[in-house]
Image (cartoon, rainbow, N blue to C red):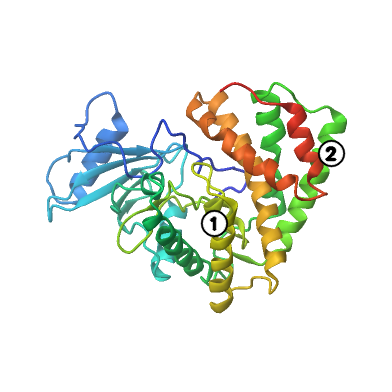
Amino acid sequence: MLRDNARVPESDLTPHAAPSSLAAPAPSSVRTGPGDPRRDAAARWAGSVLGAGRPVDLATASADASFRRYFRLVDPRDGCSRIVMDAPPAHEDCRPFVHVAAMLADAGVNAPRVLAQDLEQGFLLLTDLGRVTYLDVLAQRDPARVDGLYADAVAALVGMQRIDLRGRLPLYDRALLARELDLFPEWYLGRHLSRPPDAAEAAAIARVGSLLLDRALAQPRVFVHRDYHSRNLMCCEPSPGVLDFQDAVEGPITYDLASLFKDAYIDWDEARLLDWLARYWDLARRSGLPVPADFGEFHRDFEWMGVQRHLKVLGIFARLAWRDGKRGYLDSMPRVRRYLRATCVRYRDLAPLAHWLDEAGTAPG
């Protein structure tokens, strides 16, 4: 097994206050020092791998919502920028990253290549896909670029979904999907809103959750990146560069589409979203992917999958904000909540959840 399926990853959901990709902060060199033993060890390891004969200088590239950190360095052999991943073995396992990176490379997806590895220490040396995320560009809302970026992201997604998995990834099974849903009543309702559901409300939420899981599990299964959104896609050549794929699973075909088109960090009008979704559906059919022949059925699958994801996202945002002190996550909650409510009011079976969200109210950030 590549990863303990009991863990609900948080790496996809990064606050605006801290960079989620390898794009920031600015490249001011940070020398290793006595206050950070792991950074010192990473500098020594990278220096040895690169034949520098000494520890190399590391610049902080980013930290994500897990224990992983990333550093940028200049390769003394050719002057190119590289990335060092620091994943403390007590908390993280580099093997899924290495495994999935190889799968993506074989599929022709532009993801960081693993140049060197020390799994015992938890260090990887990676190619650098640059500093500009999709979000950096999309936030400018330049119509000349937006459609092209999403077309590239869809093409890369189809490439990933065409990978012959043959049991090479963990299943996105009912148990894992259900554990993700449990984050919503516990952390969003109970902790963030200070309104834990009573027995009747909890039963109603569970009934809706069961419907969501039934529909998700009825979908065809493909490669699921699981965090496929604007902060994990890089503007580079070829486009896009794909990051943060270590939690990939075999699961519902619409999951990554919900991540991409109903992004927690940027939103688009409904007509544009439907156009992109239809373009994906057409490309997927022509590429031999097992999407439904009826677009209406496919759209419903996409919408319901988005509800499962957004319930999870609200729970994870709340947990990271209140348990871990990462309050930047609160900034994106209103957007996610709007996605959730807009979908739920469109479907009779989900309408009780929309009503209950209205009753529960909101909490100040």
The residue located at (41%, 30%) in the rendering is: 17
Residue 128's mark? none
Q: Is residue 43 left or right of residue 102?
A: left
Residue 28 at x, y percent in the picture: 20, 34
Numbered label attached to residue 204: 2
Q: Quadrant of residue 39?
A: top left
Crowding at dot 2, Cα within 10 Å, few <14 / some 14-19 / many 20+, comes out as some
Q: Secondary structure at mark 2?
A: helix
Residue 217 showing in the rendered view: yes
Residue drawn at x 77%, y 56% is 214
Residue receiving disc 1: 272
Q: Quadrant of the C terminus?
A: top right
Amino acid type, label 1: Arg
Say left or right for 198 vs 158.
right
Q: What residue is rendered at 63% in x and 35% in y?
A: 315
Tell me where residue 22 appears, x and y as whole percent.
Answer: 33, 45
